[in-house]
Amino acid sequence: MKKHNHFETLCIHGKGKYDTLHHSVVPPIYQTTAFAFESAEDGSDLFTGHKEGYFYSRMGNPTVEALCCQLSHLENTEASLAFGSGMAAISSAIMSLVPVGGKILASHTLYAGTHCLLTRSLPGRDIITTIVENDEPETYEHYLSRESFDLIYLETPSNPILSLVDIEAVCNLARDFSVPVMVDNTFATPCFQKPAELGAELIVHSATKYICGHGDVIAGMVTGRKDLIQKIRDDVLCRFGPIISPFDAWLLLRGLKTLAVRMDRHAANAAKIADFLNNHPKVINVYYPGLSDHPGHDIACRQMSGFGGVVSFEVKDKQAGCSVMNKVKLFTRAVSIGECDSLIQHPASITHSSLKDCELKAAGISPGLIRLSIGLEHADDLIEDLNEALE
Ligand SMILES: Cc1ncc(COP(=O)(O)O)c(C=O)c1O
């Protein structure tokens, strides 16, 4: 028997058997609040943890557990948890791992929601974040050698300018300073990048995006080292209660089945569109890690097996960017990424509008920047749409 199956096969063949009664091919949806006890003693044993099993869906649910097992299987991690949104996953992991008065070292560009959590909400709880001025490993070393941190938080590729962090290099440094590393793997997914294999202790996902894949669920996941996952579960998930519903977990399980084929098409389309934009006279800059002139291309080639489905590009100014957004016909003007439909948005005035001008500048988000989430349509149709909108 072969030891290691390919990622496409892992997506289809999960580890767990969740319907031992009827052997349904697809796991059932356990849409229930509570699970009956066999006896009073049984109830007490389940509740006090003397016996394994389900008793109340905030504490555990078989459909949610099936999803968590499958993500661990794909990310090559020990354990996972599912949440009601990506931000719930990120904030829960941070709340559990970083004490009041603690410090976080974060990568240069971040999703705006994460940026605001770190720089606006957490300081009120006496948790202070330093955002590095660039993602060179030496910069991380500089900070680590001067201050003690409780967590290193990386987003790579980052939203919206697709900057890259060398995960392995930062994890090696972090180990020397005994700091755990958490990586937002939303853009790459385990299909193209497995941060745990590069040394990260925890991986977070906005499962809303590629894991779902169809734009009909808001959800988040955390996966990684078993002891840390157990702590997040006990400290935050069960007590604060930011859980996912069994139905949404089931939709994500369905999404994971097709993750490999969808990611391949997203990335193949994105590569063609990045190439087209790179040769267009009205486009000043294209951000896509698959382009050989992208500053993170070498890192991407080392740590990713594909370059993903998001492409950002810069035109002259905000007016030119808005004009492209208003002229496209196939691209839908909407936030989010990772759906079947191609989406277009203007980060400076939409997703990242909560950042001050100086923060936008520091993060490399110019007024003429447009972010595309490339969908599953034919690449030629999308290129024609962009070409006409750029005229
Ligand atoms: C990279 C990244 N991380 C986290 C999030 C937050 O996820 P959610 O919207 O599911 O809360 C987003 C949302 O766009 C994102 O792009």
Image (cartoon, helix red, strand yellow):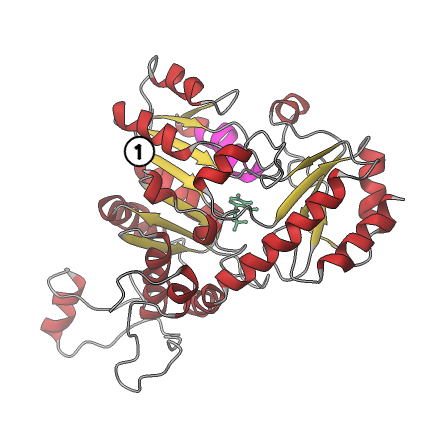
Report the residue at 54% width, 57% height from top: 263
Q: Position of residue 137 (x, y in %)?
A: 42, 23
Query: Residue at 26% of width from left, 62% of height from top?
Result: 3
The percent position of residue 108, horizontal first and vertical second, equals 52, 27
Horizontal arrangement in the rendering, residue 345 relative to residue 290 (left or right):
right
Q: Amino acid at mark 1?
A: Pro
Residue found at x 60% / y 56%? 266
Residue extending farthest top: 146
* The C terminus, quarter of image: top right
x then y, percent, for residue 88? 44, 48
Q: Is residue 189 above or below residue 146?
A: below
Left or right: where does residue 359 sit relative to residue 386?
Answer: left
Compare residues 153 and 1 and report the one nearer the observer: 1
> Disc 1 designates what residue?
180
Quadrant of residue 159 in the image? top right
Is 21 in the magenta?
no
User: Does residue 117 show up magenta in the picture?
Assistant: yes
**Which structural element holds mark 1?**
loop
